[in-house]
Image (cartoon, grey):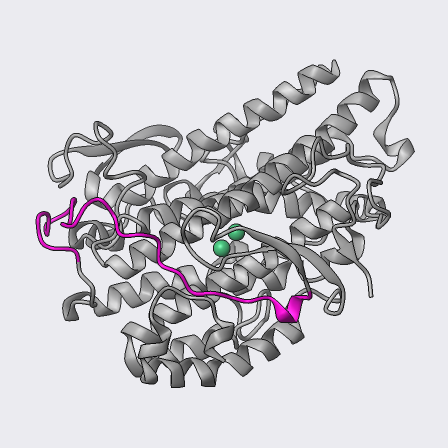
């Protein structure tokens, strides 16, 4: 079996770990069969597989069937730093084992991150049926196998470093189900259905990007195996996010061109601009909630302990003070009819700091999407909603705010909700546009074609060989 798990963690030399993984592997495969991508299990898909961490090792493209995909376990190469570089333990040697005093916290961080990986596979399981092109189908399945690999990567940490507790957590990763009434996934956005490809592209833009920022902050961790596992996962995440950004851009291009030509997108089975904006509103605000409360004692503990840093914590010149003891974070909240300034000690505001880094990056993406609209000659522009809009978690969840972040009364919110978030009718309409296209090089009518293929192959390459 261990020949079949590409790895750079010396699996061969650890019989105890081998036994644990041997017990877990069949359960993983039945989970994949039950709630992984529906269909396509016998088809040959042009996928990349990581077989090493070096150049040329992590992106090997070839035809494989999904059940034969080799889910590997990799740590990125050692970091430049060999000492903890933020929090109270600065200067200590990086940890190869979990310190007893942070066992609970590290387990919680790893479990919460790990749970999102299988969750997203479950959320996306039916999308293959309605892929707008072969290249999109390939992208979906690539994302799915890599999220499953991320599950393996995190389960390895649980098995290797957390003993019986870790084994139990690993089992539970395969027992929870996205959207299940009794056994839901841990975080709300990972229980929301992804019904159609517009939702998939918004999810991979906004929700996978939350994943990027969480992974990046864990990649700063003093617990070195966690840092290096997440560092390697980030290489694969880049493709997921590019899939999302490119997908929305192509939908906008199609919609913009139709509008410019005076054609109502609805008349030809394409996506109206206002529905795309509503999806952006829904998935970005749900993703904002994933960062947790802006004022959080857990976040302070994680930072103080050196468990979880800020985005690019170790970049020269990025942060003046790696202890974050003296500064504070300020947020404006509308309360009892007036704006109130909230001052949060910086360590407790680490979720807010990370969310701000995330939001800046999302703003650049929306700018690029708007540049696509501009190119088509359409006058509409997308708006990235304010961090205050539609929040269920944190500082802004106590009041209603519009997408610009201005407060409004509860009844005004109710009256306008359907202008800002998808309605049942919107979802049904988008579903009606989801016509599968499986001929190489062809694409559904609601979306513009890809500008280029993958791994140097042309757009009309047969990325999926149906059995
Ligand atoms: Fe992932
Ligand atoms: Fe991802």
Relative to residue 272, is residue 463 depicted above or below? Answer: below
Give the main secondary structure, helix, strand or loop, of the magenta stretch.
Answer: loop
Residue in the image at 59% along x and 77% along y: 29
Q: In this orientation, which residue lies closer to the viewer: 322 or 238?
A: 238
Is residue 58 visible to the viewer in this orientation of the structure? yes
Magenta-drawn stretch contains 68: yes
Magenta-drawn stretch contains 466: no
Query: Does residue 433 appear to the left or right of 205 in the view shown?
Result: right
Residue 386: x and y in percent read 48, 31
Residue in the image at 43% along x and 48% along y: 234
Residue in the image at 69% along x and 66% along y: 65
Q: In this orientation, which residue lies closer to the viewer: 431 or 222?
A: 222
Q: Classify residue 258 by image quadrant.
A: top right
In the picture, which quadrant includes the C terminus?
bottom right
Relative to residue 236, is residue 177 depicted above or below? Answer: below
Relative to residue 259, is residue 269 depicted above or below? Answer: below
Relative to residue 324, is residue 384 depicted above or below? Answer: above
Q: In this orientation, which residue lies closer to the viewer: 38 or 63?
A: 63
Query: Does residue 440 appear to the left or right of 381 in the view shown?
Result: right
Residue 418: x and y in percent read 68, 39
Magenta highlight range: 65-94
């Amino acid at each position: 079996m261990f020949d079949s798990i590409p790895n750079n963690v010396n699996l061969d030399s650890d019989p105890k770990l081998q036994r644990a993984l041997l017990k877990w592997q069949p359960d993983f495969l039945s989970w994949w069969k039950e709630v992984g991508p529906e269909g396509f299990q016998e088809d040959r898909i042009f996928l990349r597989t990581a077989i090493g961490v070096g150049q040329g090792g992590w992106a090997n493209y070839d035809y494989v069937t999904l059940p034969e995909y080799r889910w590997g376990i990799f740590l990125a190469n050692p970091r430049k730093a060999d000492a903890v570089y933020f929090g109270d333990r600065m200067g200590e040697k990086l940890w190869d084992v979990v310190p007893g005093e942070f066992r609970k916290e590290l387990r919680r961080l790893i479990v919460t991150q790990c749970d999102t990986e299988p969750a997203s596979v479950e959320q996306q399981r039916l999308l293959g049926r309605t892929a707008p092109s072969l290249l999109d189908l390939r992208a979906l399945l690539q994302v799915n196998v890599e999220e499953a690999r991320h599950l393996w990567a995190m389960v390895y940490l649980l098995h290797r470093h957390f003993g019986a507790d870790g084994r139990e957590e690993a089992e539970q990763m395969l027992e929870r189900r996205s959207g299940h009434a009794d056994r839901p996934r841990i975080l709300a956005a990972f229980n929301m259905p992804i019904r159609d490809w517009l939702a998939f592209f918004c999810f991979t833009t906004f929700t996978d990007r939350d994943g990027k920022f969480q992974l990046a902050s864990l990649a700063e961790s003093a617990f070195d195996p966690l840092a290096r596992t997440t560092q390697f996962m980030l290489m694969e995440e880049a493709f997921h996010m590019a899939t999302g950004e490119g997908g929305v851009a192509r939908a906008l291009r199609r919609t913009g061109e139709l509008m410019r030509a005076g054609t109502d997108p609805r008349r030809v089975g394409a996506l109206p601009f206002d529905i795309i904006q509503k999806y952006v509103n829904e998935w970005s605000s749900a993703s904002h909630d994933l960062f947790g409360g802006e004022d959080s004692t857990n976040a302070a503990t994680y930072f103080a302990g050196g468990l979880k840093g800020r985005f690019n914590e170790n970049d020269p010149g990025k942060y003046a003070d790696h202890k974050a003891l003296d500064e504070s974070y300020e947020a404006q909240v509308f309360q009892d009819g007036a704006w109130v300034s909230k001052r949060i000690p910086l360590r407790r505001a680490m979720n807010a700091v990370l969310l701000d880094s995330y939001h800046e990056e999302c703003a650049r993406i929306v700018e690029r999407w708007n540049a696509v609209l501009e190119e088509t000659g359409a006058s509409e522009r997308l708006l990235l909603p304010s961090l205050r809009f539609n929040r269920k978690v944190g500082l802004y969840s106590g009041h209603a705010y519009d997408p610009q972040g201005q407060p409004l009364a509860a009844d005004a919110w109710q009256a306008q909700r359907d202008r800002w978030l998808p309605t049942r009718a919107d979802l049904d309409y988008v579903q009606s546009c989801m016509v599968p296209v499986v001929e190489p090089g062809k694409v559904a009518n609601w979306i513009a074609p890809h500008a280029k293929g993958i791994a140097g192959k042309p757009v009309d390459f047969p990325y999926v060989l149906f059995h």
